[in-house]
Image: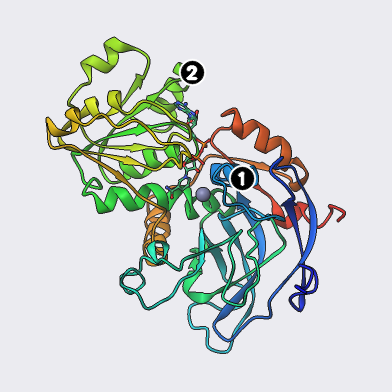
Amino acid sequence: MAKSPELEHPKKALGWAARDPSGVLSPFKFSRRETGEKDVTFRVLYCGICHSDLHMVKNEWGMSTYPLVPGHEIVGEVTEVGSKVEKVKVGDKVGVGCVVGACHSCENCNNDLEVYCPQMILTYGNIYHDGTLTYGGYSDAMVANERYIVRFPENVPLDASAPLLCAGITVYSPLKYHGLAEPGKHIGVVGLGGLGHVAVKFAKAFGAKVTVISTSASKKDEALQHLGADSFLISRDQEQMQAAKNTLDGILDTVSAVHPLLPLIDLLQSNGKLVLLGAVEKPIELPVFPLLMGRKMVAGSATGGVKETQEMIDFAAKHNITADIEVISMEYVNKAMERLAKGDVRYRFVIDVGNTLAVTKP
Ligand SMILES: NC(=O)c1ccc[n+]([C@@H]2O[C@H](COP(=O)([O-])OP(=O)(O)OC[C@H]3O[C@@H](n4cnc5c(N)ncnc54)[C@H](O)[C@@H]3O)[C@@H](O)[C@H]2O)c1
Ligand SMILES: [Zn+2]
């Protein structure tokens, strides 16, 4: 018989887990493995709440395994390193994103794209090499192979940098890959949430012109004045959308629910690229003619490799890019999930795990 989560490994751990698709999280005792020779163990200080965590606790993608400890925007301080670890030392500030394992021998792994490895292991809700379930960062400690560890420069605020480990790399990687991370490009960002708001910041830092496309007029002032976008389109406003046709080189679409693609494809110039980032569980209708007429492209992209994540963190540090966050206590997590489902967050919840988890009673 399989051991209980509390006994399967030698190190005691405390997290918050969802037990079923209601998604309600509550304290959960489990365990973490010993620090292996290539492993880094760290005390979790902060963990961002990604919309994927919400999809997962509610089993919206039909792939959740319970108990489910979410969290893949995890930052903390190294407490122990294995004998063969070269990347970091005790006391360093580090993080882990969406992936904690892969085969390390396929073409994707050889190209530092572990996330596209067919044997990729997600940070939570997947089976690790040792046969046990992976648990994420809504927990007091984390252990990961050093390949998946990202280093943070000393001067960056860890709470506001945590969301970069998923939201940041998810927008940075396609901007780079599709040749959109260049001065003079005109980028559209659809959905001004966790991913969308950092997309604006990265695109601006690359020197692009940025148009935010949103259903909510209430975000206009913030997008333009606070986030530095150049223009703002309300997607329901036919006149505005018509006037902006054929103007964008690329669009990052971060919307988390089914929505029409045609108005977005129409905004693209010839050879423009619409990159879908929102992990929408149902199929989206794809009109073909508007793609043919203009040689336009629709693509998808999933976070990014660990090497590129490090590059993104270093770029963010240099350009002072962090997420706009609302720091919450662990106890507030269920309320935060409810608010996230309604789009009521500017723009990312980050759990102060280090100061608030220990006081919760399992
Ligand atoms: N591709 C990846 O690797 C990757 C990585 C992280 C997150 N995601 C996915 O990206 C999506 C966004 O994540 P997030 O953390 O930024 O979420 P978020 O909730 O912070 O932001 C989503 C935005 O979409 C808007 N939105 C929701 N429904 C809409 C609709 N029907 N029409 C128009 N706008 C709508 C919301 O108002 C919000 O601004 C989620 O589906 C998440 O799972 C994908
Ligand atoms: Zn995420």
Residue 5 occupies which quadrant of the picture?
bottom right
- Label 1: how many Cα within 10 Å (few below 14, some 14–19, many 20+): some
Judge: label 1 CB < 8 Å from ligand 1.
Answer: no
Which numbered disc, 2 or 1, marks the residue closer to the eye? 1
Q: Is residue 236 left or right of residue 147?
A: left
Q: Is residue 150 above or below residue 274?
A: below
> Residue 318 versus residue 162: which sits nearer the camera?
162
Residue 337, image x, y percentages: 66, 38
Residue 293, image x, y percentages: 12, 30
Residue 74, image x, y percentages: 59, 58
Q: Secondary structure at mark 2?
A: helix
Determine the residue positioned at 61% across, 59% down: 125
Which residue, given by chain and number where applicable, does mark 2 sit on? 218
Residue 341 occupies which quadrant of the picture?
top right
* Quadrant of the snapshot with the C terminus: bottom right
Determine the residue positioned at 55% across, 48% down: 160
Disc sitting over residue 104 in the figure: none
Disc 2 to disc 1, how far (Cα)? 31 Å
Q: Mark 2 belongs to which amino acid?
A: Ser
Q: Is residue 14 left or right of residue 121?
A: right
Q: Mark 1 belongs to which amino acid?
A: Asn
Determine the residue positioned at 79% across, 69% down: 4
- Label 2: how many Cα within 10 Å (few below 14, some 14–19, many 20+): few
Which residue, given by chain and number where applicable, does mark 1 sit on? 59
* Quadrant of the snapshot with the N terminus: bottom right
Q: Secondary structure at mark 1?
A: loop
Q: Earlier in the sequence, mark 2 or mark 1?
A: 1
Colour convention:
rainbow
